[in-house]
Amino acid sequence: MFIDTHTHLYLEEFDNDLEAVIRRSLDSNVTKLLLPNIDLHSWGPMLGLCDAFPGICLPMAGVHPTSVTRDSIEDELNKVIEQLKTGRYIAVGEIGIDLYWDKTFQAEQEQVFAKQLQLAKDFKLPVAIHMRNSFEEVWNVLKNEISPELKGVFHCFSGNLVQARQVIDAGFMLGIGGVVTFKNSGLQDVIKEVGLEHLILETDAPYLAPVPYRGQRNEPSYIPIIASKIAEITATPLTEVAAITTRNARSLFGI
């Protein structure tokens, strides 16, 4: 059994064949699909998907850093708090800092990230952290919030070994997706060193499809491809990779 710990199946890229995508996921033994929220516009589609596939699609509550502007902060955070109070969420996510597209609202992103970390502690939930081109900025905020009750995953981890150990020493998991299959990603050496006990699997669908589907739409049924690459890197049977990463995900998200 596998768990896709980060997938955006509610996006329009899946409008035409969503049921077939989920059927392929289940046929590939990927039996739970964890859905991070993006912003005010994604609550409805995300929750509708969870209602349509209960026990398979599981929601997170959060606001993605690229959706943060000066004018959006209050409305976005109020909606996250409102939703968290319902008690139906498995994590606070997707949260963090993104400096790849635009640095205009970096200060606001940092503010919203810190607030959502506090919400995770208040509601006793793990976090799914986004850190595109922003590991140091994320760390500078996170280090002030680290405590035994705060846990989570660095989603789509693509950093170096020093950063990986930093994350692990703080009690967080590494989310590993299709990038691990890219020839020059550098993740292979990191994974070889850190061990399976610190990894969970994800697709970030529809983005970052693994080889041989790189450049195409990603989907949860490709999780076994990611797991097979990790099995190859670590010289571990695929069944063991599946068992350990699934156990890690169940423990982290309480599912």
Image (tube, helix red, strand yellow):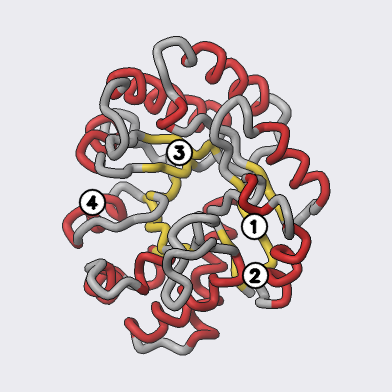
- Would you say the residues marked 4 and 2 are in contact, meaning their CB atoms lie under 8 Å apart? no
Relative to 184, residue 164 above or below: above
Task: Work out which residue is located at the far left of the displayed protein and give it.
Answer: 162
Residue 182, x across and y down, in percent: 32, 71
The three-letter amino acid code for the residue at tag 3 is Glu
**How far apart in space, not on screen, are marks 1 and 2 (Cα)?**
8 Å
Element at badge 1? strand
Q: Nearer the viewer, mark 1 or mark 3?
A: 1
- Residue visible at 67% across and 61% down in the picture: 32
Q: Nearer the viewer, mark 4 or mark 2?
A: 2
- Residue visible at 25% across and 39% down in the picture: 134
Mark 3 surroundings: few (<14), some (14-19) or many (≥20) residues within 10 A: few
- Residue visible at 68% across and 49% down in the picture: 58
- Would you say the residues marked 1 and 2 are in contact, meaning their CB atoms lie under 8 Å apart? yes
The residue identified by callout 2 is: 30
The residue identified by callout 4 is: 166
- Would you say the residues marked 3 and 4 are in contact, meaning their CB atoms lie under 8 Å apart? no
The residue identified by callout 3 is: 149
Residue 158, x across and y down, in percent: 29, 58
The residue identified by callout 1 is: 33
Q: Earlier in the sequence, mark 1 or mark 3?
A: 1
**How far apart in space, not on screen, are marks 4 and 1 (Cα)?**
27 Å
Q: Would residue 29 be found to the left or right of residue 249 on screen?
A: right
Q: Nearer the viewer, mark 3 or mark 2?
A: 2
Residue 84, x across and y down, in percent: 64, 28
The three-letter amino acid code for the residue at tag 2 is Val
Q: Nearer the viewer, mark 3 or mark 4?
A: 4
**How far apart in space, not on screen, are marks 1 and 3 (Cα)?**
24 Å
